[in-house]
């Protein structure tokens, strides 16, 4: 009798933990660096896939950017430049690292990260690394990308006294 009561009590206790476990596995919210990183990854994949709709959905109407060479780009010019690359069939891949929220307050977020693209070309695959700084703002109750600043990534630093 006591053994059955303990089993029932244990079962009730475990059932009480089930909702907590399911809440712990929820998708990251807009206050999470993962939320903004996911937006960046969606655009990187859209660039490979040639999917203009992703850019149009994420970029604000007042979007402005600076290309890696420093020239300013409008929303349309940025999207066109992003989608001008080679198709996925030629082996394009990407990775995002060092993703950091530099500033995050209600309705405004600044993020920075390193984007590495392996771009297929006639001679094989060539890597390209870019340092991006993105500004997100809430526009019409949605997070929208309002500014992107793209720069070539700094070359890795060599330790002092290292052999060449």
Image (tube, helix red, strand yellow):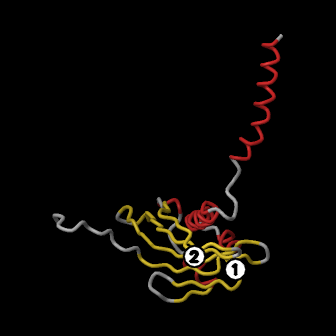
Circle 2 sits on which residue?
134
Circle 1 sits on which residue?
60
Left/right placement of residue 20 relative to residue 149 reads right
Q: Residue at x 45, y 72 (%)?
A: 130
Of residue 46 and residue 15, the one placed in the foreground of this image is: 15
Left/right placement of residue 107 relative to residue 97 reads right
Left/right placement of residue 94 relative to residue 147 reads left
- Pointer 2 or 1: first along the chain: 1
Where does the image place residue 34, in percent across and percent down from the top left? Answer: 61, 60
Q: Residue at x 57, y 76 (%)?
A: 134
Q: Residue at x 37, y 61 (%)?
A: 124
Of residue 157 and residue 5, the one placed in the foreground of this image is: 5
Q: Residue at x 17, y 67 (%)?
A: 161
Of residue 95 and residue 93, the one placed in the foreground of this image is: 95
Residue sitting farthest toward the top? 1
Q: CA distance from mark 2 to mark 1?
A: 12 Å
């Amino acid at each position: 009798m006591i053994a059955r009561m303990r089993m029932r009590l244990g079962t009730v206790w475990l059932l009480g933990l089930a909702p907590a476990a399911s809440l712990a596995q929820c998708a990251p919210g807009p206050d999470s660096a993962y939320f903004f990183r996911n937006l960046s990854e969606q655009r990187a994949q859209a660039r490979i896939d040639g999917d203009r709709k992703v850019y149009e959905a994420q970029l604000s109407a007042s979007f402005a950017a600076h290309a890696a060479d420093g020239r300013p780009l409008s929303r349309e010019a940025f999207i066109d430049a992003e989608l001008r690359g080679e198709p996925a069939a030629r082996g394009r891949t990407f990775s995002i690292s060092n993703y950091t929220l530099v500033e995050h307050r209600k309705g405004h977020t600044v993020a920075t990260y390193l984007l590495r693209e392996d771009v297929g070309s006639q001679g094989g695959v060539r890597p390209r690394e870019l340092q991006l700084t993105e500004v997100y703002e809430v526009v019409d109750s949605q997070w929208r990308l309002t500014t992107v600043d793209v720069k070539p990534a700094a070359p890795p630093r060599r330790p002092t006294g290292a052999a060449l």
